[in-house]
Image: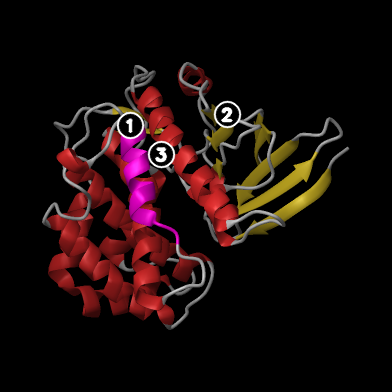
Amino acid sequence: MSRAADSYGTGYVLTTIARSAEGDYRWTRRPGPHRGGALRTPDPAVLDAARMAARGRVGLTLPERADATGMTYRTGQARSIAAMLLGPRSGESDADIARITADTFVETGAALARLHTVPLPRADLPSPDGLLRLLSWLQDGLGPGAAPDLHRHATEMLGRDRMATVAAWCVPATEAPHALLHGGPSMGILLPLTPDMDGGLLTGENLAAGPPESDVGWIIGELVELGASIRRFGTRRDFDFDMFIGRVLEGYTAALDLAAVGRTAALRFLTHLHDFAAYMKWHDVLVEYLKLVADVIDAAGAGQLLPSPGEVVRS
């Protein structure tokens, strides 16, 4: 028997975290009401391939059950890095959170690097869902909720040239080497590495194929967005998000095209704006965020969004 520890979601995905009788936690993720379909059930052969890279200080936490209603992951924790950054627990300082988060990101970079070395188990794995979702919206301007409203504002504020540029970035170059990808690494499904417990990255529903820079840029894009929003709007809890970006790159010891990582980071930022409008609600602050994402797109297009290779500290 399980009892709920937390439950939250959007029109795209619903998450329930429940404590089991054994004392661990089950994270169950189900499609939201406006997703337009079920979560993609991972092929057993693809899960077996991912399992080859699963072990690490931040491990790849694979689903223990997948069915028509969702996917369940068994973990030792009930809080993600995203939740940790939103607010401390009693007795937890910002310095504690910064240290845990930095350590987690180093090992997350290492986890993605491990996954990307696994041979592709199938030739027909799809591109990451987020990039396909964003490309569809960029091309036709349609979608649930306020997605069409956001598209009208984006066309006006970003301009058609930027919109065409980011649409082109959504399509991986055919000559680029493809790897087995997580497909959507996010702070909301990243469990912290603490002094007494290994971290984990929930992995399964988004497994895909594409250039390694896609995974690395996706999670770095969340950090780019947070850093940009703090500089624009301010906050009482200001973490060093540029340092966190450096820790991801430090942990990913294989070669990366940092300009390509930056382009995907910009796509992640814009995808988050799309998803908020489409699966939550319209809010006028999205217009201000479009101004921020315009600057991020320009920096990424110039190859200047992320540090140069010489500036990345590697262990």
Q: Is residue 213 visible?
A: yes
Q: Position of residue 75 (x, y in %)?
A: 67, 34
Q: Tell me whether circle 2 and circle 3 mark residues in contact (CB < 8 Å).
A: no
Residue 28, by quadrant, is top right
Q: Is residue 192 above or below residue 268?
A: above
Measured Cα–Cα span from mark 2 to mark 3 = 13 Å
The residue drawn where x is 17% and y is 74% is: 159
Q: Mark 2 or 1 closer to N-term?
A: 2
Q: Position of residue 126 (x, y in %)?
A: 36, 35
Which quadrant would the C terminus be assigned to in this image? top left
Circle 2: is it few (<14), some (14-19), or many (20+) Cα within 10 Å? many
Q: Mark 3 or 1 closer to N-term?
A: 3
Q: Which mark is residue 146?
A: none
Q: Position of residue 140 (x, y in %)?
A: 29, 65
The residue drawn where x is 47% and y is 16% is: 52
Residue that numbered label 2 is attached to: 62
Q: Is residue 155 above or below residue 315?
A: below
Measured Cα–Cα span from mark 2 to mark 1 = 21 Å
Residue 224, by quadrant, is bottom left
Q: Is residue 215 visible?
A: no
Residue that numbered label 1 is attached to: 252
Left or right, 173 with respect to 21, comes to: left
Left or right, 212 with respect to 26, comes to: left
Residue that numbered label 3 is attached to: 183
Measured Cα–Cα span from mark 3 to mark 1 = 16 Å
Q: Secondary structure at mark 2?
A: loop
Residues rendered magenta in the picture: 239-251
The kind of residue tagged 1 is Tyr
